[in-house]
Amino acid sequence: MSLLPAEPVPPRIFFEDTVPAIFAGFEFNEAERALDLRLGIVLLPGRGDDEGGAWTLHFVEGELGIVEGRSEDCELTVIQSVADWRAVLWEGRPALVAEIVDRVAESGPEALRSEPGFLSLRNPEALKGLSEIRGLVEVLVEAGPGDGAGRGREDGADRDWRLGILVGPGPIPAAPQASIRLGAEQAEAIRRGALHPLEALITGQLRLEGDLGLILQLQAVAMTASMPPSPIPPSS
């Protein structure tokens, strides 16, 4: 059962009330408790009554601290419109991302320990490598048929979905240095297991643009984090 609110709530309530409540129920292993990571959240307001905001989530010694405002010390920052943030949490779009968020909200770090491929987190120590990378990557899922997980409303299903990922500390650049683009239909095929990401890349269904070195650096950290850490040899 997902611990996310059944109905949309304002970002401030979500990050200052809901997230700490969900986090409090998680159990962390020794490697996860050793993690010291600052995650920035920047939600951009849109039309109407959208309320944006920014927060810094500091994971340290198995505890979570949340303060308003994004610190430039954040090793990782997520930038997104309020509309696209709501789409993931309450509209199930894109389903490829929404399902992962649901699993994490339900079972916490266990969801990432068991997640296959580059989304798994078996070696949290590897995330320290994020501080050595600098750059903004935009993920764009282009609108089209085949998206949606059948959860909640279908409003906005014909709208592109964007996510900015700033890797490394520092100010947020005015424009991304690299982008990862794919269609909603291809994202759905990857979610179902009908299309492998590598096949999508080779066939041009998944496109990388801009600074490919930045994407490769980010991929290297993700791959290292997905592999169990090497055992420490016994001292002689």
Image (cartoon, rainbow, N blue to C red):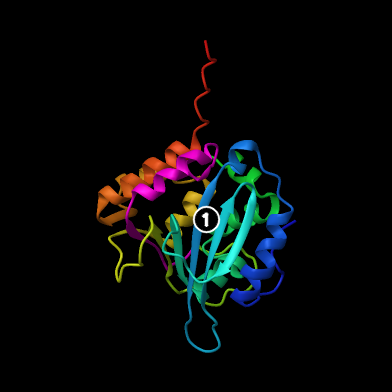
| Residue 131 appears in view | yes
- On whether residue 74 falls in the magenta region, the answer is no
Pick the front one: 54 or 236: 236
Point 32% across, 50% down: residue: 215
The extreme front residue here reads: 236
**Residue in view at x 52 percent, y 76 percent:** 53
127, 225: nearer the viewer: 127
Residue 223 on image: x %, y %:
43, 39
Q: Quadrant of residue 178?
A: bottom left
Q: Position of residue 104 (x, y in %)?
A: 63, 52
In this rendered view, identify the residue nearer to me: 153 or 216: 216
Q: Residues within 10 Å of mark 1 (few under 14, many from 20)?
A: many
Residue at the extreme top of the image, as rendered: 236
Image height of 118 relative to 140, above or below = above
Circle 1: element type: helix
Residue tagged by mark 1?
Answer: 96
Chain part drawn in magenta: 117-145
Q: In terms of depth relative to the viewer, which is nearer, 119 or 96? A: 119
